[in-house]
Amino acid sequence: MKNRNQTNEKSNQLESHSASNEETKLTTNQGVKINDNQNSLKAGNRGPTLLEDFILREKITHFDHERIPERIVHARGSGAHGFFKLNKSLKKYTKAKFLSEVGKETPVFVRFSTVAGSKGSTDLARDVRGFAIKFYTEEGNYDLVGNNIPVFFIQDAMKFPDLVHAVKPEPDNEIPQAASAHDTFWDFISLMPESMHMIMWLMSDRAIPRSFSRMEGFGVHSFKFINEEGNVHFVKFHFKPRLGVHSVAWDEAQRISGVDPDFHKRDLWESIENGSFPQWDFGVQLIPEEDEDKFDFDLLDPTKIIPEEEVPVDIIGTLTLNKNPDNFFAETEQVAFHPGHLVPGIDFSNDPLLQGRLFSYTDTQLSRLGSPNFHEIPINKSINTVHNNQRDGHMRQQIVKGKVSYEPNSMGGGCPFQAMISEAGFISHQERVSGTKIRERSRSFVDHYSQAKLFYNSQSAPEKMHLQNALVFELSKVTIPQIRERMVGQLNYIDKTLAKNVAKKVGVGIKELDFPNQSLPADSNPISLQSEEKETYTKSSDALSMKNTVKNTIKGRKIGFIMANGVDSRSINDLKMQLENKGATIEMIAPDLASVKTNDGSILTPKHSLTSTASVCFDALFIAGGEDSTKELLASDNGHHVLNFINEAYKHCKAIYFGNGTEPIYMKSNVSSKKHDDPAIITWRDANSENNFVIAIAKHRVWDLEQERNS
Ligand code: HDE
């Protein structure tokens, strides 16, 4: 396939120095062969080490400088190569070639990230996820640097350092790591009405995804498409995961952070290694330029979505991730994204947050990657050749011949020439701009609560409960009662019941807010703008609830088979085959890592022991059949681990299948004490049990039964 080849070419560049050949000999960085990599050069074998040992000094100096500054935000990331295939032409709207020719495949590199934590923090922090894509198009690199949440905390770039300082660990004691549950974050947020819509998303389970492959991606800002005739459409970008949008429970997230802090990174890596390639449908919302003002919010305001009921998402292509990086540092760490890396046919809007980003990304690469030549690092290189008169700088790779580094010139034959208009150079959209130079927020940005309500109204009952619990968790960690009170005051403008329930749990009353909002013109405080009509805002949007994204698939699900010696071989093999054929991954869990002998004498090798993993690492459990196996699983050393596994999976609303002969385990677990009809608990008694297990796994979780399961 052309694009995969292109993708591979890209990573082949990186392989050129790999040491796979047996003949390869160890050398210094200058290419001198080394014949002792065990001992430093000393004056006598018990004497002091000599300064002249250039081999030792080179090795240690390189090591001393192995770390580069981590990203100030989005430090923790995971990346993968893949390709984007266009299924529907957008030629009518944009002249970008990679969006014009149906069937065209464009290589991509994607980096997912958390925002607040350090590089070594956990994947399961409650946080926004970065969703950044570099398209290596034939017209140059196009970067779509988005998130898994379609709105942002703030409306103007001026507030970004404040936001990040507030959420990062507090500067006196560097606590807490990768968490928003602390005083400074909520102090800031409770004073920022414009953050309320984002806060609804952040407190929802969207902020604790099951995997990267089950997250949506959004460009967030409105961008512009420009076609050959120069006509403009505003565009919002969407990625919809083929597996549906799914999350874990907060209790699970906290457990996973201990049991497997690399849970998302590992899931991405393993699904690609297993050939179960993550895929997203890529879609656009298109708004003709003349309709810019037809919405009851401003298209330039990054705290607003365009509800899909108002402008449907038109699916135009597929994003597939099919190759893991060969080297984390060289690729995932050194990749440098920038919302200003555009190709002809795509342009910015005047969104004031986006405008600020245009400055920030190159600036940050200079300190992070250390040189203006970061575009020469293989992962950042465009697939078409770069020609210009930029020269020199730290770590320059390109060797440009000749004397000429200026334009116009005659000595270099005039090269490189400017592209002719007909040769598809980048032409900025010719927008008429006039206005008074002023530091002010537009009045059209003033409504901060309607879409927060829209999001909250659109959630299913369990989603609302999770959101409420998240607010209670976070605000309970806030030590200053006035901050908790102010935040509850904000929630009261979104949903009175939500505010009341949170207030009760965090020990404060509900008061009217009376602080000025400094970001808005004095006469347009959003709190005073809470009209009757806005307070009773009852719109909802189906696209905003994860419940409506469930797909009928178990692809990518991880299912734990719990078993011990004497386990029924046939039931394991049959179910395993059935689940694997449908794209799920099976991992065997036994009391310890020793091989397990089945009832027909065959040998199974467990991947985990009962104590080296936990049910939170799996989407569903099969307690494999067999009376001997059951006996061993309930033996004194193992019993409470097995029951813990099952009870936890039960609490987290997962599908559990009890095989033939496991009744004693079933009876001892919490599952047996419940009387209700639970479609995700399958037992030896059920007809069609394997099929029902598959159906239950495909539904992700039975969140609707959460209260019942936990009562
Ligand atoms: Fe970023 N952001 N950002 N951001 N952002 C960075 O660039 C910044 C914003 C996003 O995997 C930094 O190379 C400012 C919105 C992603 O490498 C930095 C503002 C959205 C990534 C930066 C924003 C994003 C970054 C840090 C407000 C969603 C990770 C390291 C004006 C649409 C990309 C780096 C990767 C990274 C600045 C707001 C997404 C400092 C100033 C809104 C996915 O340049």
Image: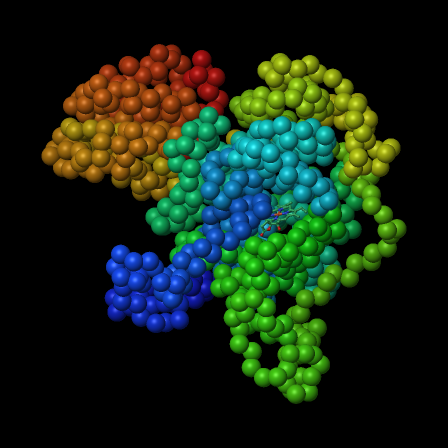
Residue located 41% across and 32% down the image: 258
Q: Quadrant of residue 481?
A: top right
Q: Is residue 85 above or below residue 568?
A: below
Where does the image place residue 620, in percent across and percent down from the top left?
A: 36, 30
- 633 or 333, nearer to the observer: 333
Where does the image place residue 157, in percent across and percent down from the top left?
A: 71, 46
User: Does residue 285 appear anywhere in the picture?
Assistant: no
Q: Quadrant of residue 262?
A: top left
Q: Is residue 660 above or below residue 560?
A: above
Residue located 40% across and 71% down the image: 30
Left or right? Give the position of 123 relative to 158. left
User: Does residue 456 appear anywhere in the picture?
Assistant: yes
Where does the image place residue 479, in percent across and percent down from the top left?
A: 61, 22
Residue located 55% across and 45% down the image: 74
Where does the image place residue 435, in percent across and percent down from the top left?
A: 87, 52
- 14 or 532, nearer to the observer: 14
| The C terminus - image quarter | top left
| The N terminus - image quarter | bottom left
Which residue of the protein is positioned furthest toward the left in this rendering? 601
Q: Is residue 504 above or below residue 684?
A: above
- 703 or 30, nearer to the observer: 30
Q: How is the image coloured?
A: rainbow
Left or right? Give the position of 688 relative to 136. left
Left or right? Give the position of 401 relative to 49. right
Residue located 34% across and 59% down the image: 49
Tell how many labels: 0
Q: Is residue 331 above or below residue 711?
A: below
